[in-house]
Image (cartoon, helix red, strand yellow):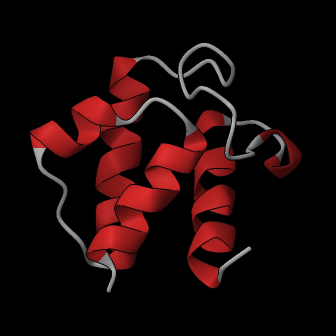
Amino acid sequence: MSRIQDKARALIASKLKISESEVVPEKHIFNDLGADSLDFVELSMLLEREFNVKFTEDDTAKVKTVGDLYELIEHYAK
């Protein structure tokens, strides 16, 4: 797992108040991890600040799983 994924996993777990072991790429952010739309907006903003990136609304609309979120961060963090 990359440094970006490690850091993102810790932030996701902290924001959603779950164990880091639950934050795996195949987990659905809403259905499996219990996030709601406000959680996701706040999480997106937190990740943007942490990784110094900016996501578009189109980008975030496509995110369904933790893996999708990792890919999005890695795409912009280059």
Residue 18 x %, y %: 77, 36
In the rendered structure, the answer to whether residue 31 lies left or right of residue 42 reads right
In the rendered structure, the answer to whether residue 30 lies left or right of residue 59 reads right
The relative height of residue 8 versus residue 45 in the rendered view (above or below) is: below
- Quadrant housing residue 42: top left
Q: Which residue is drawn at 29% across and 52% down?
A: 45
Residue 33 x %, y %: 67, 25
- Quadrant housing residue 39: top left
The relative height of residue 43 versus residue 78 in the rendered view (above or below) is: above
The number of callouts visible is 0
The relative height of residue 62 versus residue 56 in the rendered view (above or below) is: above
Q: In which quarter of the image is the C terminus?
A: bottom left
Residue 10 x %, y %: 68, 60
Residue 68 x %, y %: 47, 45
Q: Which residue is drawn at 66% across and 58% down?
A: 9
Q: Residue at x 82, y 39 (%)?
A: 22
In the rendered structure, the answer to whether residue 46 lies left or right of residue 56 reads right
The relative height of residue 56 versus residue 41 in the rendered view (above or below) is: below
Q: Quadrant of the N terminus?
A: bottom right
Q: Which residue is drawn at 46% across and 29% down?
A: 64
